[in-house]
Amino acid sequence: MDLIDEIYTAYPFYGNRRIRAELNLTHQIIIGRGHVRTLMDKLGLQAIYPQPTNSSQPNKEHHIYPYLLRNTEIKRPNQVWSTDITYVRLERGFAYLIAIIDWYSRYVINWKLSNNLEIDFCLECLDDAMTQNKNRPEIFNSDQGSNFTSHRFTKILKANDIQVSMDGRGRCLDNIFVERLWRTVKQENIYLNSYQNILETRTGLNEYFLFYNNRHRHQSLNYQTPSDIYFQ
């Protein structure tokens, strides 16, 4: 799973066929395509390319909102926030990380770490973002994962008069700024540290996100930091 995560982070356009080939030929790990697919599903990984809209079914009890950002020009902070969940490897086991990012500035509004995929840490992350930040986004974008389509999650957004937007099924590029954030966090922090447990990981990521928001200069932001742009 660690190798699959590293391969995907480096080559997010790789599907289970190419990841299987990489494992078999480069790392000499003999594994079937079905097993690779199962592990990718467990990690929440999906190759970045358009796929059939029925490749997986959302929770039938949850309402799926349309994607609102196609051809939308992002002009200011708090116009769009978006979120996603990614896998974090530990020395023994793994955890899950959620972050909420401002599209315009790349500023990480809030983040949480959990040892499971239950919805509670997602709700806590969103609720803290709403209560600790005086600003509100006009649009909040996510994928169609069951935690984000849950009424418990979307009602917080609707209660704050925020428009709900969701990626098209199989279109990871609809939420590309969060995908880029995960790649940066993993390559600059997670892969460089052998975190032992959740507490150690949380401490390390807290230091990293402070650095990312306040000192990490982005070429796309004319070498300013996310906080420079977000609070301008």
Image (tube, grey):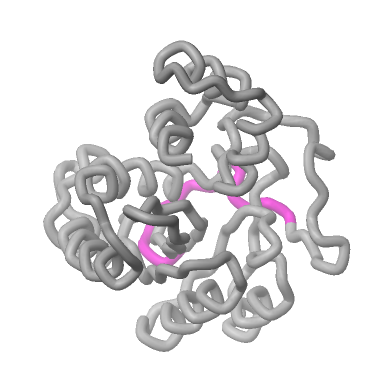
> With 34 as the anchor, is 55 left or right in this view?
right
Comparing 18 with 64, the one in front is 18
Above-or-below relation of 224 to 135: above
Q: In which quarter of the image is residue 148?
A: bottom right
Q: Residue at x 79, y 44 (%)?
A: 56
Q: Which residue is drawn at 58% across and 31% down?
A: 47
Can I make out residue 231 in this image?
no
- Residue 204 horizontal/vertical position (percent): 21, 63
Comparing 65 with 32, the one in front is 32
> With 7 as the anchor, is 148 left or right in this view?
right
Q: In which quarter of the image is residue 153?
A: bottom right
Q: Give the range drawn in magenta.
A: 66-80
Q: In which quarter of the image is the C terminus?
A: bottom left
Q: Quadrant of residue 104?
A: bottom left
Residue furthest toward the left? 215
Chief SS of the magenta region: loop
- Residue 45 horizontal/vertical position (percent): 56, 41
